[in-house]
Amino acid sequence: MAAKKQALLRSLGMQMRGLAVRGALLGDAVGGRVGLSGTDLDCLELIANASQEAMTPGQLAAATGLSSGAVTGLIDRLERGGFVERVADPADRRRLRVVARPARVREVGAYYERLAQRTAALWSQYSEEQLRTVLDFLRRSAELSSAEIAHIERMPALPPARRQPTD
């Protein structure tokens, strides 16, 4: 592979990792303003995007990889903040669904409005062909990430570090 392409690929990798970190920091910043963690916000987005279908706690656990106990705590926090409500599933009253409260979700969305406007302005500078390429790249990268998450979850956990004796 040509040296220029290798350098370009390294730069692309660094930018992607930097974007992922900034996305997490953005979630933490917004979360700090609305009383949630970045993970809580990510889960709220999943629930809100489920729309009328809602999500069961089990579906949320499967989508996030969180344990059932962690999902229960997360739903408790979201419910206390007025972001979601638990409702009985009309098809099976024993089953619980988690439904986003749209007005409260819109309040959170206000923290993202400026970014959304600036991002739309940035994206509008690219041709349709360029945007299709970027979209293809993002879709395929997301698929790779999902496959890698599944692979990592099958790997053994890193053992705790042993304390080093002090001299």
Image (cartoon, rainbow, N blue to C red):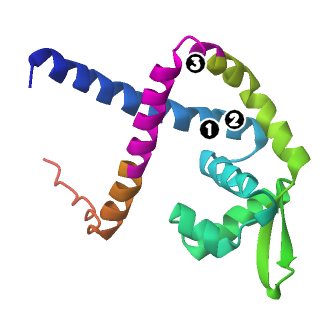
| Above or below, comparing residue 103 to residue 150 in the picture | above
- Name the residue tied to disc 3: 123
Between disc 3 and disc 1, the foreground one is: 3
Please identify the residue farthest to the front as the structure is shown. 129
Measured as percent of width and height from the top left, residue 24 is found at 53, 38
Query: Which range of residues does the magenta coloring cover?
Result: 121-143
Residue 108 image point, x, y percent: 79, 38
Q: Is 133 included in the stretch rendered in magenta?
A: yes
Q: Residue furthest top?
A: 125
* Marks 3/1: CA–CA distance: 21 Å
Q: Say which amino acid is labelled 3.
A: Trp
Residue ID at (68%, 72%)? 57
Q: Which mark sits nearer the N-terminus, 2 or 3?
A: 2
Q: Where is mark 1, residue-wise?
A: 27
- Packing grade of label 1 (10 A; few <14, some 14-19, many >=20) is many
102 shown above or below 150: above
As drawn, 158 above or below 10? below
